[in-house]
Image: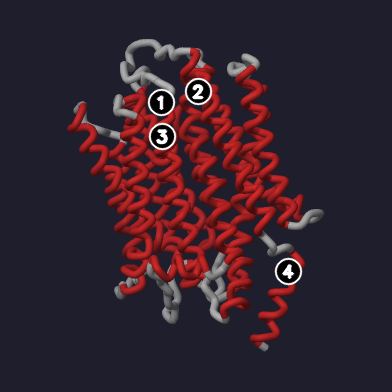
Amino acid sequence: MKLTARQKAAFGIGAVGKDMVYALSSSYIMYYYQDILGLSASFVGLILMIARIFDAINDPFMGILVAKTRTRWGKFRPWLVSGTVLNAFVLYAMFAAPDIKGTALMAFFSVIYILWGVTYTMMDIPYWSMIPAITSTPADTENLSVIGRTCAGVGSALIAMGTMLLVGIFGGNSERAGFRMVALIVAVIFVVAELICAFSVREREDSSMETASVSQMFKALFSNDQALVVVLSIVLINSALYLTSNLIIYFFKYDFGGADWKVNYTLFSTVGGACQILGMMIVYPLLRKKLQNTQIFVAALLMGMTGYVLLLAFCLTGNTSNLPLLFVPGVLVFAANGILSVLTTVFLSNSVDYGQLKSGHRDESVIFSMQTFVVKAASGVSVFAAGLGLDLIGLVGNSDETGPVMQQSAATLTGLRLIMTIFPMILLLAALLFFRKKFKLTDDVVLENSEKLRAQNS
């Protein structure tokens, strides 16, 4: 069954909606509960880590539930719709916290965030799992994956571009009221987007879905050394990204400063989001015409590291309030992340062929499930590290919304600069050294593996 342009567009719209929700939560939940509501950054980070690790473990069980579902609407769409509606309500509640303090607020946050993770998994797993179930055409399967990844990037970029600007527009002096309104808007867009996807894309009647237990996922990963290299590289790269995305708003509010810090943060995020999309859709295809994938991967890592080096240099030389200058490292870091996100997916696909030749069986579904598992776990750890770092450097949140922005000490600002540059730099350097030493699936090897599999299947 060949997919129509309408179905592909509907699937892409679904990706935009769901990643707007994910980006709002992952990028601003720490800021909302720590800086605006006054909870300890370490506590917020700890809950985020616990919830994301629990969510990662929960993924395979959600996959099993979806696989065993039998309804007249199929196995995916009931979960997609119900998970979306529930998650939209929880998202709004999460950014519309009641006027409580202390232990009561800590309990509320702990429960609501775990609920958010569970309900998001309810719709996220069926969304990605239904790709092979709605078409049997290899070209459509590949195109749908690319559409989903690209549109997910668009959804994340939209949140990065507009959130703080809209918070200021809707909330005025009250960031708390602004976030409540933004969450409501995003929740509505989310529901509409997933309904469009659910009613436009239908699974084949003869489709089946493979699921894997956590033990199977780890077994498949550790028996495939190249998949292990890619997954560990993804962990290191994503950890650097999550550290940056959680701390950059603090940098603009307290270090860059000024009455227009929200506007400047929005401009920076807009340029960064656009560069990330351009990295995926334009820069990578252009580089691919001349270079091997492994060469592009190394170049992208070096590009990202260069961006962090420049950002640190600008901070240490008193240029933290020079927005045009800050665009330079921003462009390098975000474009590099866009390229790396494409390449890690390509490498993971190539490792599946390698594993099949090595073991005699194909572990495509379990390898990609493992990627989701470790990325969620790694994001939880990196967010906890960000929260712990904020407390260690003594950053004082600005929970009194009617007053001026809280002035931070010179030591606090220096600590913030170091955390958001040096640690990501170290993580990217580790990824570079590990990748160059262990990864061996060059373009020639990939082609050779493909020919061997074709010969085996002929």
- Percent from the top left, x then y, of residue 92? 30, 40
Query: Viewer-nearest of labels 3 and 4?
Result: 4
Q: Mark 1 or mark 2, which has the lower sequence index?
A: 1
Distance of mark 1 from mark 2, alpha carbons? 9 Å
| Amino acid type, callout 3 | Tyr
Which one is closest to the eye, mark 3 or mark 2? 2
Q: Position of residue 377 (x, y in %)?
A: 42, 51
Amino acid of disc 4: Val
In the image, is 197 to the left or to the right of 4? left
Residue 388 position within the rendered picture, expressed as x and y whole percent measured from the top left: 39, 32
Task: Between label 1 and label 4, give the one nearer the viewer.
Answer: 1
How many angstroms separate mark 1 from mark 4 (CA)?
A: 47 Å
Q: Nearer the viewer, residue 181 or 440?
A: 440
Residue under label 4:
445
Q: Secondary structure at mark 3?
A: helix
Which three-letter amino acid code belongs to the residue tagged 1?
Leu
Distance of label 1 from label 3 (alpha carbons): 20 Å
